[in-house]
Amino acid sequence: MVKNYAEKLVERILENLLENNSEYAHICRCDDCMDDIKAKALNNIKPFYITGKIGEVYGEYFMRECQNSTNIVIEVTKAIEHVNSNRNHDNSFVKYVG
Ligand SMILES: [Zn+2]
């Protein structure tokens, strides 16, 4: 099975940002909005694919290395702001593509 550790990384950064920034207290945290934020950020972040048990070790290492990466934090921040200001719970992802 192929896994993209950039997804886990984005999830972790998103959780941290939402927890630690009072300015994000009003952000909708439903599954749709969270998925839209992750998808939007991931489109701008290089994937880190792994397979198998050894891959997971590399994946964890990658996450530790990148957790404070400014570029990735900026992408997630931009995605939060974009989804928040274009919130639409019906097919919202359609708004960003094309
Ligand atoms: Zn929502």
Image (spheres, helix red, strand yellow):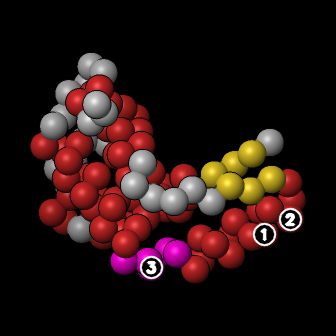
Q: Which mark is residue 57?
A: 1
Circle 3 crowding by C-alpha within 10 Å: few under 14, some 14–19, many from 20: few
Circle 1 crowding by C-alpha within 10 Å: few under 14, some 14–19, many from 20: few
Q: Earlier in the sequence, mark 2 or mark 3?
A: 2
Residue 19 can be seen in this image? no
Q: Position of residue 61 (x, y in %)?
A: 68, 75
Q: Disc 2 to disc 1, how far (Cα)?
A: 5 Å
- Three-letter residue code for mark 3: Asn
Q: Are discs 2 and 1 less than 8 Å apart at CB?
A: yes
Q: Which mark is residue 68?
A: 3
Q: Earlier in the sequence, mark 3 or mark 1?
A: 1
Instruction: Give the residue drawn at x 58%, y 80%.
Output: 65
Q: Quick check: 29 above or below 42? A: above
Instruction: Give the residue drawn at x 75%, y 70%.
Output: 58
The image quadrant of residue 48 is bottom right
Residue 50 can be seen in this image? yes
Q: Is residue 42 magenta?
A: no
Residue reaching furthest to the right: 53
Instruction: Give the residue drawn at x 54%, y 52%.
Output: 7
Circle 2 crowding by C-alpha within 10 Å: few under 14, some 14–19, many from 20: few
Q: Is residue 67 magenta?
A: yes
Q: Position of residue 2 (x, y in %)?
A: 74, 45
Q: Which mark is residue 54?
A: 2
Circle 3 — which element?
loop
Name the quadrant of the N terminus: top right
Q: Where does the magenta region start and end?
A: 66-70
Q: Is mark 3 within 8 Å of ligand 1?
A: no
Relative to 35, 64 lies left or right: right
Circle 1 — which element?
helix
